[in-house]
């Protein structure tokens, strides 16, 4: 996907080096040109998807949006939630027989404003996700063309637009323009033992708590949480030291080869009455997260080494049925904007990813 290395809207290693001041600004304010497909793919048609495409898109994603040990399981009505939302841009590639050969989505980072700790306050920040190419067309330039097309389309509608996107890497690179890297850890819910009493926090209660407190969080912050598919749950428990811990867990709609659901911790923190705080390095979340995993009974619960992901550690393997560092690294990137920092910039967003 050479797109990222050929556009001036992509941050460079110089930006990430620490030798230049990261002031809040767009890297590109003019509209990008519409890309052209490689000659070998000129028979394809790229267009914006409509609700009538929901069934075909759900089937396409379930067949081709996958890793070596997981696949995606989205219901048609869940796909329709994206296609009926005018703020979501879904592009699809079709061949001459009208068969779906590629997809990409751009969804709002938040329905509110995006705040950054270096002073930015932005209305239009989008997430690139759902990039999926039919197996017969991979490594032929279609992915880069679709990224370029959605970049041009979203900027034409809402621009100038900031975008964030995620990648799963085998290992942490030495040099990178990522906002951060996070090492995965996971536990089998069937093997987890619940040692803490938990309360599931109602969505409206948590949403109010978040909106009243998130302006104090460091890094990049989505001011309004979203639960589009209804798969996000908030858990709360009081640990042995009397601290009220909170974890936000998403049903990713990913399943393993044997059909096991995959859950992921997307934010961790703690509260004192109506004041919400981000998790900090000295806190211990292992027993709390194991108790949450036990409530699901089946599936895998993923956490990460970040403060927002539960501060998972290698030593968790010695104290419970955890596996650390065997599922690669999650990296998040920003496009068309300079963030507060690179490499250690936390992202606080309560939303579902594809």
Image: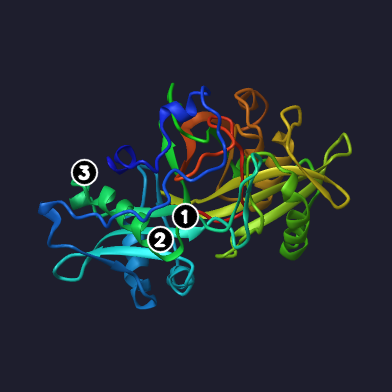
Q: Image point 71% across, 28% down: which residue?
A: 281
Element carrying mark 1: loop
Q: Position of residue 155 (x, y in %)?
A: 41, 59
Q: Earlier in the sequence, mark 3 or mark 2?
A: 3
Q: Which residue is mark 3?
A: 139
Q: Position of residue 336 (x, y in %)?
A: 45, 45
Which tag is nearer the camera, tag 1 or tag 3?
Answer: 1
Numbered badge on residue 161: 1
Question: Mark 1 near mark 2, Cβ–Cβ under 8 Å?
Answer: yes
Numbered badge on residue 190: none
Q: Nearer the viewer, residue 256 or 329?
A: 329
Which tag is nearer the camera, tag 3 or tag 2?
Answer: 2
Q: Is residue 319 left or right of residue 38?
A: right
Q: Is residue 171 left or right of residue 220?
A: left
Q: Position of residue 107 (x, y in %)?
A: 48, 60
Q: Earlier in the sequence, mark 1 or mark 3?
A: 3
Q: Which residue is mark 2?
A: 154
Q: Real-space Cα distance between discs 3 and 2?
A: 24 Å
Q: Image point 37% across, 45% down: which residue?
A: 67
């Amino acid at each position: 996907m050479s797109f990222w290395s050929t556009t001036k809207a992509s941050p460079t290693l110089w930006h990430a080096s620490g030798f230049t001041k990261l002031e809040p600004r767009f890297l590109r304010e003019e509209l990008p040109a519409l890309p052209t497909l490689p000659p070998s793919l000129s028979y394809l048609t790229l267009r914006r998807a409509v609700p009538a495409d929901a069934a075909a898109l759900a089937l396409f994603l379930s067949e081709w949006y996958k890793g070596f040990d997981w696949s995606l399981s989205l219901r048609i009505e869940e796909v329709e939630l994206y296609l009926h939302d005018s703020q979501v841009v879904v592009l699809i590639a079709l061949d001459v027989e009208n068969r779906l050969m590629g997809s990409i989505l751009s969804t709002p980072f938040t329905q509110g404003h995006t705040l950054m700790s270096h002073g930015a306050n932005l209305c239009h920040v989008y997430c690139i996700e759902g990039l999926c190419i039919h197996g017969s067309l991979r490594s032929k330039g279609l992915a880069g063309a679709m990224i370029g097309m959605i970049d041009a389309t979203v900027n034409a509608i809402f621009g100038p637009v900031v975008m964030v996107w995620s990648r799963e890497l085998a290992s942490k690179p030495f040099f990178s323009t990522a906002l951060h890297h996070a090492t995965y850890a996971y536990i089998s819910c069937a093997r987890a033992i619940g040692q803490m009493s938990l309360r599931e926090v109602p969505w409206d209660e948590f949403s109010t708590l978040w909106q009243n407190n998130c302006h104090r969080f460091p890094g990049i912050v989505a001011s309004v949480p979203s639960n589009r598919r209804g798969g996000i749950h908030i858990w709360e428990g009081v640990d042995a030291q009397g601290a009220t811990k909170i974890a936000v867990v998403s049903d990713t709609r990913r399943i393993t080869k044997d059909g096991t659901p995959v859950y992921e911790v997307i934010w961790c923190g703690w509260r004192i009455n109506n004041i919400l705080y981000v998790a900090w390095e000295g806190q211990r979340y292992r027993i709390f997260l194991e108790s949450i995993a036990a409530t699901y009974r089946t599936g895998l619960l993923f956490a990460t080494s970040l403060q927002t992901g539960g501060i998972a550690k290698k030593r968790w393997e010695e104290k419970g049925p955890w596996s650390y560092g065997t599922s690669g690294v999650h990296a998040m990137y920003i496009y068309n904007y300079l963030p507060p920092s690179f490499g250690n910039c936390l992202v606080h967003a309560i939303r579902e990813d594809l």
